[in-house]
Image (cartoon, rainbow, N blue to C red):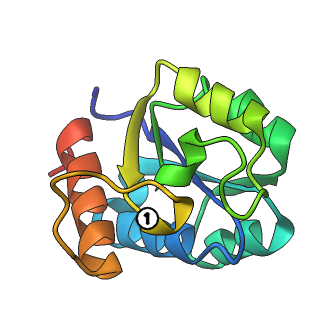
């Protein structure tokens, strides 16, 4: 990705926004001024949580997620962001279709609460998964 221009990343989360908050915090801590982070929450609590962590902008709800899915260079969040009806039904089929169908690069955190088990995954802490996602975004963007 070209240097000099901020790389636009969407961090998507729902429910309490804890994963999104940790992602935003890690990205800001490691790559701060090189990124423009847009927090996209399925609800106001998730959005607010990501804003508190330092997101540069934010929007809430289905249309915000659909609208922004092809307007960023990277999308990051829990694996549920490509699964219809995940997050206890909070994540709509329209959101899943927009994110899953987007040509944007995606960094997905494998959360087993979504009813999906990824073969080959060994037990790992959520913090280790967040750290790996942050590092991979750095490699993808050429920032680290």
Residue 4 rendering spot, x and y as whole percentages: 33, 35
State the image quarter where residue 63 is shown. top right
At x 36%, y 56%, the residue is: 117
At x 16%, y 68%, the residue is: 122
Looking at the picture, tell me which residue is in the foreground, 109 or 83: 83
Answer left or right for 42 relative to 19.
Answer: right
At x 78%, y 43%, the residue is: 92
Answer left or right for 59 relative to 27.
Answer: right
Relative to 71, residue 23 above or below: below
Residue 21 rendering spot, x and y as whole percentages: 55, 73
State the image quarter where residue 97 is shown. top right
Residue denoted by label 1 = 111
Q: Quadrant of the N terminus?
A: top left
Q: Secondary structure at mark 1?
A: loop
Relative to 27, residue 103 above or below: above
Residue 75 rendering spot, x and y as whole percentages: 49, 41
Relative to 53, residue 83 above or below: above
At x 27%, y 81%, the residue is: 125
Residue 123 rendering spot, x and y as whole percentages: 21, 75
Number of residue marks = 1
Instruction: Judge the density around disc 1: few (<14), some (14-19), many (≥20) Cα neighbours within 10 Å.
Output: some
Answer left or right for 144 relative to 56.
Answer: left
Relative to 36, residue 117 above or below: below
């Amino acid at each position: 990705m070209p240097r000099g221009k901020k790389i636009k990343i969407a961090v998507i989360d729902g429910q309490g926004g804890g994963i999104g908050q940790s992602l935003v915090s890690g990205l800001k801590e490691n790559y701060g001024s090189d990124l423009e982070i847009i927090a996209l929450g399925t609800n106001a609590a998730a959005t607010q949580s990501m804003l508190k962590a330092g997101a540069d902008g934010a929007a809430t709800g289905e249309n915000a997620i659909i609208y922004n899915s092809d307007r960023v260079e990277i999308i990051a969040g829990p694996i549920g962001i490509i699964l219809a009806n995940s997050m206890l039904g909070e994540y709509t089929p329209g959101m899943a279709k927009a994110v899953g169908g987007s040509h944007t690069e995606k960094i997905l955190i494998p959360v087993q609460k979504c009813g999906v088990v990824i073969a080959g995954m060994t037990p790992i802490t959520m913090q280790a998964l967040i750290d790996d996602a942050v590092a991979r975004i750095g490699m993808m963007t050429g920032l680290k």
